[in-house]
Amino acid sequence: MNIINIKTIFLIFGSFFMSAVLCEAAVLKEVSQGTDFGVGSDIRVDIVLDTQGKSINAIEGEIIFPKDILTLQNIEDGQSAVGLWVTNPHEVIGLLKNKIVFSGVIPNGYLGERGLITTLFFKANSVGSGSLTFNNTKVLSNDGTGTIVPLTLQTLTLSINTKKSPISAPLSNDITPPDLFNPTVAQGGPEFYNGKYFIIFNTHDSESGVDHYELLESKVGYSSEDLENLPETSWNRVSNPAVLSDQTLKSYIYVKVLDRSGNQRIAMIAPNSLNLSTEHDYSITIILSIILLLGAAFCAGYWCFRKRQRHIQNLS
């Protein structure tokens, strides 16, 4: 459920970010461990952004690939420079070719040569050759106005032969659940969900990446064990933010996040913990500020964690 597009989000929040220094076109490229593979080989492709001296804070696009020779096995974005996904990277099935669609925001912007956007894992399933191509792809400058930055696209052509390739890219062994998070219940003005109560949530998974969120509203509270044993039909898959079914706010609210390896974490809001009144009237700007600041907080925390880890490694 995408409330507005990526351009609108950037225009609302551009004034919070740094100004960019415009120079040459940014480069978005597909990087693999090779170009020649045998049938049955695992192929890893990193989508990498080189900003060429600019500060970039939004990106969107599609990656099209031939499904007759490649099968998408997994997508990982736990190490992505993107801090807040508007559209999580996901596969869309086509007649002759499939595509991966994505769009996201980078709070405070990214400036560098190897900004990982997402990682794709393919299986070579038949002999042939084909290219992974970009479509409808653009990046926005971190200049306060959402300027579209000139973009050079470097695509990848793969050749699949009958020989078994010694090169492989096994899927990651992610057994760690997503980070802890605290959902927030809010009420919009007349222009946002017609004044209904909704819930905002966001978290990060540093390995395989967040896959999706699910929502459960119940008149009774559940223990952790009970939640794990509930049938899948009890949960509703949702996007951020999500309108609540119980507008009386008398239900227990559970938000479950699952990463791309199936690990999960659940956050709960009890009805007696809510302190809301009908006087709350959040505008679209305030609501989106909350969403973006949540993403920025996770990005800042994760950046500090990685910096401390590098410092410890250097000392050792």
Image: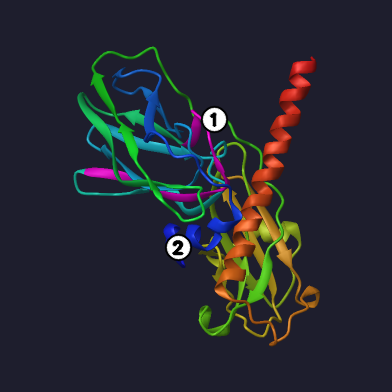
- The overriding secondary structure of the stretch rendered in magenta is strand
Say which label, 1 or 2, has the lower sequence index: 2
**Residue 186 image offset from top left, x and y in percent:** 65, 74
Q: Considering depth in this image, is 287 or 156 the residue closer to the camera?
A: 287
Q: Residue at x 27, y 13 (%)?
A: 163
Residue 101 falls left or right of residue 213: left
- In reply to whether residue 107 is colored magenta, the answer given is yes
Residue 315 vertical placement versus 25 (above, below): above
**Residue 165 image offset from top left, x and y in percent:** 34, 14
Helix, strand or loop for disc 1: loop
Q: Residue at x 45, y 23 (%)?
A: 169
Look at mark 1 in the image and give the residue it sits on: 172
**Residue 31 image offset from top left, x and y in percent:** 39, 26
Q: Identify the image's colour scheme: rainbow, by chain, secondary structure or one colour.
A: rainbow
Q: Nearer the viewer, mark 1 or mark 2?
A: 2
Residue 79 vertical placement versus 39 (above, below): below
- Amino acid carrying label 1: it is Ser
Q: Considering depth in this image, is 163 or 113 the residue closer to the camera?
A: 113
Span highlighted in magenta in the image: 97-117
Residue 127 falls left or right of residue 236: left
- The tag on residue 8 is 2
**Residue 272 image offset from top left, x and y in percent:** 80, 77
Q: Residues within 10 Å of mark 1 (few under 14, many from 20)?
A: few
Q: Quadrant of the C terminus?
A: top right
One can see residue 51 in this view:
yes
Q: Considering depth in this image, is 201 or 72 the residue closer to the camera?
A: 201
- Amino acid carrying label 2: it is Thr
- In reply to whether residue 147 is colored magenta, the answer given is no
Helix, strand or loop for disc 2: helix
